[in-house]
């Protein structure tokens, strides 16, 4: 999964993501009842209620909010339920907010535009199952190899790889990426999964096999619909997402995961290059919830403990 604005992974590298796991999301939206109230009660400057508030930049501390860019259509990492974002990322964001004394306000957007939104100031951070990759760190477009921006810094908080999702019963006999040569594959645009599929396409051609007919969509649910209808033979997405869809779609009768995870790597919370104070504050908060056990509880809630990290690293992706 290595497209410059990819993976969510899609190890999000949504080119930036894994066993049957589901993802955890903490939702902290302005006006979200209890959770917003808790954030306000903690107070951006309260060291007792929010022990790491002092690490944040002064303007964010004063505002009490961190705007977070996210493609909220990627269950179980993040998805809408009752008009609110839920899932792994929202749950983790909620726990981080308690440490920092702020709310994480999730702003919905297309995955392949999230880094653009970050760099234009529409968001201060990205949480969207986005894989930490060197291309993203350096602002390199994975396909062209050209510099397209200043890049971002990542605080790594989870590990996931890409999985192959097929129709239940695997009617086309798909077992590995090599089995996709000459077939229709649907997936989300701008993800690591797209990068993996394109690399496999090059391998198909090198091996003298027909190319993959790759169909890309703005959201993963669109790709899943194509697979469900039999218009494609597979969808590639992060393992937690693939496992979740295999378990829940059609009561578990629509899809199944085949083969091993591909290119497992870290999910990262992205911030703009140069925004080092915010980056370091988020890193401290992730390490704090790992140490106090909240992180583990969230992963257990979503059955994704296989993706746990023991410490938050900066730009640990490859």
Image (spheres, grey):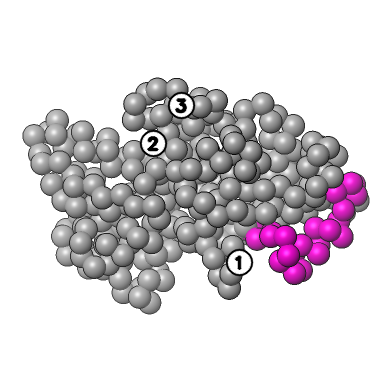
Q: Is residue 255 magenta?
A: no
Mark 1: few, some, or many residues within 10 Å (few <14, many ≥20)? some
Mark 3: few, some, or many residues within 10 Å (few <14, many ≥20)? some
Q: Is residue 253 left or right of residue 178?
A: right
> Label 2 belongs to which residue?
3
Q: Earlier in the sequence, mark 2 or mark 1?
A: 2
- Residue 273 in the image, given as x and y percentages of width and height: 62, 28
| Tag in front: 2 or 3 | 3
Look at the image and tell me whether residue 241 can be seen. yes
Mark 2 touching mark 1, by CB under 8 A? no
Q: Which residue is nearer to you in this view: 284 or 115?
A: 115
- Residue 134 in the image, given as x and y percentages of width and height: 48, 28
SS type, badge 2:
loop
Which residue is situated farthest in the top direction here?
146
> Label 3 belongs to which residue?
148
Q: Quadrant of the N terminus?
A: top left
- Give the quarter of the image for residue 229: bottom left
| Mark pair 3, 1: CA separation | 33 Å
- Residue 185 in the image, given as x and y percentages of width and height: 24, 52
Q: Is residue 290 left or right of residue 81?
A: right
> Label 1 belongs to which residue?
84
SS type, badge 1:
strand
Q: Residue at x 39, y 56 (%)?
A: 220
| Mark pair 2, 3: CA separation | 12 Å
Q: Residue at x 66, y 41 (%)?
A: 124
SS type, badge 3:
loop
Look at the image and tell me whether residue 291 can be seen. no
Q: Which residue is nearer to you in this view: 218 or 34?
A: 218
Range of the magenta residues?
26-47
Relative height, residue 229 to residue 201 (above, below): below
């Amino acid at each position: 999964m290595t497209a410059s604005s990819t993976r969510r992974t899609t190890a999000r590298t949504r080119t930036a993501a894994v066993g049957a796991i589901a993802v955890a999301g903490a939702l902290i939206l302005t006006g979200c009842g209890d959770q917003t109230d808790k954030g306000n009660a903690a107070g951006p400057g309260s060291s007792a209620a929010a022990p790491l508030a002092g690490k944040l930049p002064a303007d964010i501390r004063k505002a009490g909010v961190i705007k977070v860019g996210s493609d909220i259509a990627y269950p179980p990492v993040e998805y809408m339920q009752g008009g609110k974002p839920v899932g792994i990322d929202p749950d983790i964001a909620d726990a981080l907010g308690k440490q920092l004394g702020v709310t994480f306000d999730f702003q919905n957007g297309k995955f392949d535009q999230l880094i653009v939104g970050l760099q234009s100031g529409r968001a201060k951070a990205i949480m969207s199952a986005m894989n930490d990759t060197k291309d993203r760190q350096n602002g390199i477009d994975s396909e062209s190899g050209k510099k397209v921006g200043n890049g971002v810094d990542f605080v790594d908080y989870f590990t996931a790889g890409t999985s192959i999702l097929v129709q239940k019963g695997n009617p086309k006999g798909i077992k590995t990426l090599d089995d996709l040569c000459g077939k229709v594959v649907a997936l989300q645009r701008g993800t690591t999964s797209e990068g993996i599929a394109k690399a496999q396409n090059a391998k198909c051609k090198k091996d003298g096999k027909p190319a993959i007919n790759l169909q890309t969509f703005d959201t993963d649910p669109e790709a899943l619909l194509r697979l469900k209808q039999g218009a494609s033979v597979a969808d590639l997405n992060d393992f937690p997402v693939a496992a979740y869809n295999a378990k829940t779609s059609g009561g578990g009768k629509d899809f199944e995961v085949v083969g091993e995870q591909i290119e497992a790597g870290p999910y990262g919370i992205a911030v703009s290059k140069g925004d080092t104070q915010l980056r370091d504050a988020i890193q401290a908060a992730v390490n704090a919830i790992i140490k106090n056990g909240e992180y583990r509880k969230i992963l257990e809630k979503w059955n994704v403990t296989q993706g746990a990290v023991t410490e938050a690293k900066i730009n640990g992706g490859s």
